[in-house]
Image: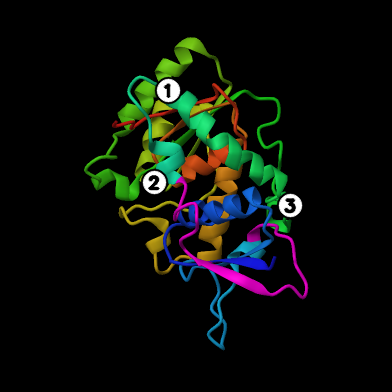
Amino acid sequence: MGLHKIEFLKGTGIFSDLTAILSGIWYCHDNSIPFNVHWFNGNYGKINVDGSMENLFDTYFFQKKYANMEVDFVYDRFTPYNSDITSLYFFNNRKDEIFEDKVYDNLKKPADIIKDIDLLNNPFFNSLNPNYFGNQKVLGIHRRGTTYKSHPIFNTEDKTYFDSINETFRYNSFDKIFIITDDGESLENFKKEYGNQLIHTDTQLTTDGVSPEFQKHWDRKMVMEQCLRDIFYLAQTDYKILVHSNASLWSLLLNLQKNSFKVIQSYF
């Protein structure tokens, strides 16, 4: 059996790309097929003088190297497990099911695969603090702003998050609230609402409603690494309030625990 090459050159958001890549990894893992990921994204990776592009997967993740093994199949975005796992394993639910329980059941296998292939055993993730919050009990929030503010389905005001946070505090106590967001205006609203209880990283935020991946004059490497770092830290929180977003999805995949999250904006 030869090597299967998972090639992805699409140029969308970081975690949109990664969900598609994960579908190929999942298929190869299920069928004991050696694989190699080639992930190129001009929004984040370097383009060399000769026109070649940086393999972002090698830069930020671990994958086995197979010397002298010929490629006998190439997946160009689409894999036998569809093009991505989002619609199949995150958003679909039935009204007679508990949504978060269904999400957990659907994500358990890919989350286990991420651990099995040691995906985060890479200098970038190894440089991050695996005990970022110390002994504090932390509520994690993913506030997706920018394009969601004008989205006909996903548009959610900050007050929706405040209501969900306050409801969560009725049944649980937390030392801190950790927020990741791409939206500077929302962060200021959260600061006013929760004061010193709120913590956040130094991630550069937008003020014009344009997503970070489309900010032409920003440092692309910085955007990439801040996004990956924030999701890694969000994954460490004790309980999460999430949204329909691939970034939210990955915060679960990196540390999946039952009864440790809820998803707002569930429109089904």
Q: Could one spot residue 262 in this view of the protein? A: yes
Precedes in sequence: disc 3 or disc 2: 3
Quadrant location, the N terminus: bottom right
Residue ID for mark 3: 121
Precedes in sequence: disc 3 or disc 1: 3
Q: Residue 75: x percent and y percent?
A: 52, 65
Q: How far apart are marks 3 and 2 (CA)?
A: 32 Å
The magenta span reads 60-85
Q: Residue 97: x percent and y percent?
A: 40, 21
From the viewer's perspective, tell me whether residue 187 is left or right of residue 267.
Answer: right
Residue at (42% x, 23% y) in the render? 165
Magenta stretch: includes residue 69: yes
Residue type at the position of mark 1 = Ile
Residue 165 tag number: 1
Quadrant location, the C terminus: top left
Neighbour class for label 2 at 10 Å: few (<14), some, many (≥20)? Answer: some
Magenta stretch: includes residue 173: no
By secondary structure, the bulk of the magenta-drawn segment is best described as loop
Precedes in sequence: disc 2 or disc 1: 1
Residue 184 tag number: 2
Answer above or below: position of 202 versus 102: below
SS label for mark 3: loop
Answer above or below: position of 195 versus 234: above
From the viewer's perspective, tell me whether residue 103 is left or right of residue 162.
Answer: right
Answer above or below: position of 265 versus 230: above
Q: Residue 54: x percent and y percent?
A: 59, 73
Q: In which quarter of the image is residue 124?
A: bottom right
Neighbour class for label 1 at 10 Å: few (<14), some, many (≥20)? Answer: some
Residue type at the position of mark 3 = Asn
